[in-house]
Amino acid sequence: MKFPSTRAAAVPVLLLSALAILTSCKKETPAAAVHPPVPVTIGTVIQKDMPNRKEWIGNLQGTVTALVKPNVAGNIIQRYYTEGSVVKQGEPLFQIDPAPFQATLDKAKADLATAQATETKIQQDFVRAQNLLAGKVISVQEFQNQQQNYQASVAQVAAAQASVQSAQVNLDFTKVVSPIDGLSGLANYEVGTYVSPSSTQPLTTIVAIDPIKVVFQVGQDDYLSLITGSINDPSNATEQRKENESVGMQMILSDGTVYPQKGTFRAVNNQISTQTGSITVEGNFPNPGMLLKPGLFARVNATVGVINNALVVPLDAVITIQNLHQLAVVGADNKVSIRNINVGLMTRNEAVILSGISAGEKIVVQGTQKVTDGCTVVPLLTGSKTPVASAGTGENGATKKLPATSPTPSN
């Protein structure tokens, strides 16, 4: 029997093995993944005049704070007002024991009466001396002595009258009255306590809080933004001030409540602090019912000029990675291009773009965390998860222009 050679028999086996390996490799190669379009909400970059509004932290103070101190010393015998109540100017607050001051006034009046009686007698002597001098009965020296006595008596009467007035003033000071209209504070001294002008604490405090004053610090950069237009053209100062006053100031309380009353600028300090680089600014807010109290902290929003023809996008559209800002720009084919931008003014809802984008371009507003460079997106109706039907702007749907001033729904 004749057997085939070993080499010839091995050839078919090798071919079969190679074929099996190729088949197995072909089955293990995965098909290329196809990413479906990402549903997002799309907005449009708009161009408009943007009020340059800034926000600062301030605290509320009374427009006038009066420390009520005693002008005379004595024991408090009565308190007239109710602590924490509204008082009017001239309304009595405390009564200091008036007895010693009444006695001083009575003595001063008695001294005045004595001085006036003495003046009357000396005046009569002076008139008689004039007649005697005319008849050459007395010498000129004797007449001059009478004249001097009369002038001295007139001065003594004037001094006595001043003493009476001083005693009357001190007696009046025993009744401590409110120097202003405002809200009264707690009494620092009880009835029976001895007080004097040198007492360490005031009797109480009265604050005028309608309107109420908010005090905050404005950095020098913000201050320069406020006056830039006036520096370039001093004639714009009055117009700029009127514009800022018309926009007004907005106050947000510490719990997030937006105060409904509009405020106005009250005053600006005359110098910038070299230590903090800021200037003190005060504003007034109406305070009906005197509900707001001094000492409260609040955020203050105010305009410091207008950015003309600014490129504005919704703040939700801005992608922030460390110090880098980006926008997901949507092309005509609904493909996304991640673009670096420079951001200027930012408010609670909007951002001003300084460079990197053009007006009218479409951007991803909601869903930025789901898009990547080069991916395809499909626009959604605002506030829904349903893609927009095609309307001639692309195969995957139509875009919807979102007003930059209106909040967009969160994902």
Image (spheres, rainbow, N blue to C red):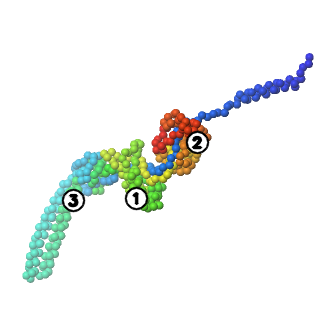
Residue type at the position of mark 2: Ala
Quick one: label 3 or label 1, which is nearer the N terminus?
3
Mark 2: few/some/many CA within 10 Å (<14, 14-19, 20+): few
Residue at 11% x, 75% y is 126
Helix, strand or loop at label 2? It is: loop
Instruction: Look at mark 1 in the image and give the residue it sits on.
Output: 238
246 above or below 28?
Answer: below
Farthest residue toward the front?
A: 392
Q: Which residue is mark 3?
A: 169
Question: N-terminal of the two: label 1 or label 2?
Answer: 1
Q: Position of residue 47 (x, y in %)?
A: 50, 49
3 or 1: mark nearer the eye: 1
Which disc, if any, is residue 332? 2
Where is 129 relative to 60, above or below? below
Q: Amino acid at mark 1?
A: Thr
Compare marks 2 and 3 and give the one earlier in the sequence.
3
Amino acid type of the residue that numbered disc 3 sits on in the rendered structure = Val
The front one of 395 and 24 is 395
Residue 131: give x, y in percent of width and height: 8, 78
Mark 3 is surrounded, within 10 Å at the Cα level, by few (under 14), some (14 to 19) or many (20 or more) other residues, namely some
Viewport quadrant of the N terminus = top right
Q: Nearer the viewer, mark 1 or mark 2?
A: 2
